[in-house]
Structures are given as structure tokens and as C-alpha cells.
Amino acid sequence: MLNKLIHRIRRHKRIRSKLKGTVDVPRVSVFKSNRHIYVQLIDDVNSKTLVSANDVTSKIKGSKTDVSVKLAGTVVELAKKVGIVKVVFDRGGFKYHGRIKALADKMREAGLQF
């Protein structure tokens, strides 16, 4: 278990060294635990979170993948209210499959450009 965490953190550091969010093109940061998923749109230049959502506060029900898809729709709605159309995707060191892939695909489908 500890090895998995260490490898994920290393992957995340490697990814973050290449990604940077701005006011115009924020970074979509994704974190998933065994039960929940959290998404934030972050402006790294000013160190501010522009939009955030998670399945805990929104009380979305369903399977983990279904929850990710519904959460992506919520995030896109919030982003459009703020005027964000283009983003940089930060998968947080997690492998790009399952919930992460479903979330990203739905965000693209709903109108965000990666």
C-alpha cells in the first residue's frame, strides 16, 4: 500500500512540473479516494481555487464511475458561470482510466477544452 502511494506521488510531481494553470486556462486538479472524488479548477499564478466540487457535498448517488460523470457535469456548469472554457487537466498521479477517464471524457463532452 505504501509503495502505491509513493509511486502515485512521484508521478504527480512529474506531471506537476510540466503543468501550470493561469486565470485564463486553469488547472483541473483531480483527487480520488476509495469512496469519494474531488475536483478543483486552480489558478496557480495567483494560488487561488476558482471552482471546486466533490461528491460529498453534492450528495450524488450511484456507482463510483456514475458519480464521477455527474460531478464532471457539475464542474463544467460552475466553470461556465465563471467564464472558463479552456483548461489543463491534472490527473493527480492517478492512472488515466476508470473514474478519472470518465470524468475527463464528460468534461470534454460538456464543452471544456483540454
Image (tube, rainbow, N blue to C red):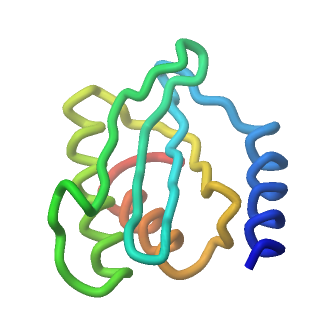
Question: Which residue is at 63% across, 71% downward?
Answer: 96
Residue 109 position, x and y percent, is: 36, 63
89 displayed left or right of 111 = right
Observer-nearest residue: 114 or 72? 72
Question: Which residue is at 42% across, 28% downward?
Answer: 49
**Quarter of the figure that contains the N terminus:** bottom right
Residue 111 position, x and y percent, is: 34, 51
Quarter of the image for residue 40 reads: top left
Question: Which residue is at 15% across, 65% downward?
Answer: 59
Question: Which residue is at 38% across, 36% downward?
Answer: 85
Residue lying at the far front of the rendered structure: 2
Count all numbered tags in the image, as a single digit: 0
56 displayed left or right of 64 = left
Please determine whether, in this image, residue 55 is positioned above or below residue 27.
Answer: below
Residue lying at the far top of the rendered structure: 46
17 displayed left or right of 79 = right
Quarter of the image for residue 62 reads: bottom left
Please determine whether, in this image, residue 65 is positioned above or below residue 45.
Answer: below
Residue 67 position, x and y percent, is: 29, 74
